[in-house]
Image (tube, helix red, strand yellow):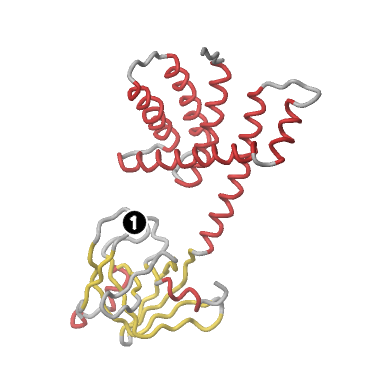
Amino acid sequence: MNYVVYLDVFLIINTFMDFLILVIAKSLIKPRTTINRCILGAVLGGVMSVIALLIPFKIIWLRFITSYIFICLIMCKIAFKTKGIRNNVRNMCIVYIVTFSIGGAMNALYYYTTFGLVVNRILSGYYVNTLNVIRFISIALITYLITEFLLKVFMKNKASNTRLFQTRIWIKEKYVDIVALLDTGNLLCEPISGRKVHVIEYEAVKDIIEKENGFYRVIPYNSVGNSKGLLNAIEVDLIEVENEGNLPLKLEKQIIALYDKKLASDGKFEGLLHSSIKESINGY
């Protein structure tokens, strides 16, 4: 069976879909890039897809590498200015997750809802014979708008679970004020007693830590993308956390793990409060 491929239609569809995918992936990756770079990456991806289609590959795996790995890698590097093997692989995985999600959403929207029937009748219906490419782009665009809306809802919900609080840490009669992040992902506990552990940058509290206090315990940790390790920890007398204009939340005899690097690359916070205090924060 012979198939007829219209290269102009193939180029338009590929470029359009690549652009939608890169824009959505950009929202997830949050790189320092622009829409113009996404457009450039999409156009180059579309052109390279046409070239790959025209090359008569005799080896199947060579076509696979060219079409699904090399082209995606170039698109990511252009759109997101990615450096490093790990970052490139991560971004490519995100792009393909978005690709499969959009593909599934488009099929579901077109074949399993009355919306698909309505769009089909409007675009190619009873009065006008419209090109399939217009129908495809319309479905893709509507899918993109729905995906963007759901993504914004998800990101807004995620942001509501990640808040910064003015925090005061007391050791004897000394204290320091820091900005701490309450992140639901912080589930760190002392392995023997099971007590909750807050993570604080050592530089932020070193002035109130006396040598005789010592680091009397270590806390094992394992973060996403990093290997396992150990953190020195001490017990502090009190942690006070701002509480929406009310009296501060007071946490007595708390364990803090001392992190010797920066917790936030932009310096916005210096500590990670344990997720268990979430329910105690007024209005959270």
Secondary structure state at the residue bearing disc 1? loop
Q: How many C-alpha atoms fall within 10 Å of the one at disc 1: few (<14), some, or many (≥20)?
A: few
Looking at the image, which residue is at 42% across and 61% down?
Answer: 268
In this view, 168 is above or below 17: below
In this view, 220 is above or below 13: below
Residue that lies at the very extreme toward the bottom in this rendered image? 173
The foreground one among 71 and 104 is: 104
**Numbered label tally:** 1
Residue that lies at the very extreme toward the right in this rendered image? 127
Residue type of the residue flagged with mark 1: Val
Task: Judge left or right: residue 228 versus residue 83.
Answer: left
Looking at the image, which residue is at 55% across and 13% down?
Answer: 4
Task: Judge left or right: residue 205 versus residue 244.
Answer: left
Q: Quadrant of residue 231?
A: bottom left
Q: Looking at the rendering, in which quadrant would you find the C terminus?
A: bottom right
Q: Which residue is mark 1?
A: 224
Q: Whole-percent x and y of residue 32? A: 45, 43
Q: Quadrant of residue 62?
A: top left
Residue that lies at the very extreme toward the front in this rendered image? 1
Q: Whole-percent x and y of residue 177? A: 39, 75
Looking at the image, which residue is at 65% across and 23% down?
Answer: 132
In this view, 284 is above or below 104: below
Q: Whole-percent x and y of residue 193? A: 28, 80
Q: Quadrant of residue 245?
A: bottom right
